[in-house]
Amino acid sequence: MKPLVSILIPAYNAEEWIAETLQSAVSQTWENKEIIVVDDGSKDKTFDAAQKFSSQGVRVVKQENRGAAAARNKALSLCGGSYIQWLDADDLLSPDKISRQMAVAQDRQDNRLLLSCAWGGFMYRSNRATFNPTPLWNNLTPAEWLIRKLAQNLYMQPATWLVSRELTEAAGWWNTELKVDDDGEYFCRVLLQSSGVEFVPVAKVYYRASGSGSLSYIGLSDAKMASQLESMRLHIAYLRSMEDSDRARAACVQFLQNWIPFIYPNRPDLVKESERMAAELGGKLEMPTLSWKYSWIKTILGWNTARRAQLFLPRTKWSVIRFMDKALYRLGDGKGNM
């Protein structure tokens, strides 16, 4: 028999999207699969919407709200697959995503090989998803992959990965203490245990952008700022355990520099810790400056007000674009047609 692939979906207040997501999972051309949804204490009808797919082999379980990482751990504890496909409750897989990657896995015969693929972002209309290749869209060693991510502030959507059971068990459980970037930290550990990354360009994932509603959105949350820095500290430690070269340390410093605007000036304690970490790596951080659009606000009303404006205005613009995309989606009978 072909290996069993477990598609694991944590869900929280995903009533609007869960059916579309589950349809993309059910429609996978890789036939030997199981689909497990863990409803993390949703306050809407996520559980009922997911239960409608039970006749198609989808297993839905409930737990008290403990966060996405805990929901993923619960799903992992219930699954029996030889390969794991993580999938958020509002994202989509192309019908042959798993088949394409499993073809490579079966050809390579390496249980420590980590498989990734292309991903494109969209709001409501998946057929309008934009695929923007990055330097991570290549076959890379674990250290090279992480150096590129940190130095260039790159991102790989979690659903792109297909992970063997052996590699999953070696990486361990998701970190339930992190309030943000738990996926980045988790896949660092997966990378650390892998023999390398193989990019499968013909497999595709569709990532629904949700802006400030996303779990990854930091905003002005003290807890998320602290969590982000903790995740960065772990990223740096993982990379240095693989390669502690000048270029690796330079990538780590740049990583800290890229993220300092998200905590400055609101958390001077975290800024100071970031500077200490950079100095230990042989570098120095520059404090962020405001563009002309916001600098006058700082002069009149101070940094904190200018920072709030810097967060609010792009969100407002994004909300308008999202509203327009939603209207066009509904005019098209609510079908993304990816």
Image (tube, helix red, strand yellow):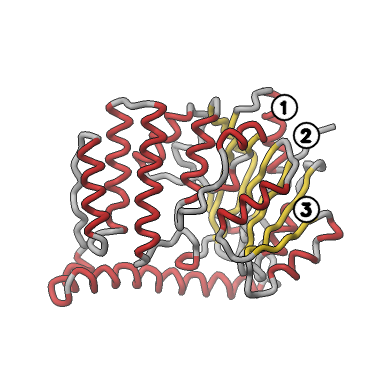
**Of marks 3 and 2, the one in the foreground:** 2
Which quarter of the picture shows residue 4?
top right
- Disc 3: which residue: 26
> At x 29% / y 46%, what residue is drawn?
256
Residue at the far left in the pictured view: 299
Looking at the figure, which quarter contains the N terminus? top right
In-image side of 261 versus 31 (left or right): left
Q: Quadrant of residue 148?
A: top left
The kind of secondary structure element at disc 1 is helix
Q: Is residue 136 above or below residue 230?
A: above
Q: Report the residue marked by disc 2.
A: 3
Q: Quadrant of the C terminus?
A: bottom right
Mark 2 or 1, which is nearer the eye?
A: 2
Q: Callout 1, which amino acid? A: Gln
Q: Position of residue 303 (x, y in %)?
A: 19, 68
Real-space CA distance between mark 3 and mark 2, rounded to the nearest whole angstrom: 17 Å
Q: Which mark is residue 319?
A: none
Q: Nearer the viewer, residue 204 or 228?
A: 228
Q: Earlier in the sequence, mark 1 or mark 3?
A: 3
Give the residue type at disc 3: Val
Up/down of 84 relative to 92, above or below: above
The crowd level at tag 3 (other Cα within 10 Å; few <14, some 14-19, many 20+) is many
Q: At x 63% / y 70%, what residue is drawn?
A: 42
Say which residue label 1 marks: 106
Contact? badges 2 and 1 (CB < 8 Å): yes
Real-space Cα separation, disc 1 to disc 3, in angstroms: 22 Å
Please rate how many residues cluster around mark 1, counting C-alpha atoms within 10 Å: few if below 14, some from 14 to 19, many from 20: few
The kind of residue tagged 2 is Pro
Which is more N-terminal, label 1 or label 2?
A: 2
- Report helix, strand or loop for mark 2: loop
Q: Could you tell me residue 89's position as x and y percent? A: 64, 59
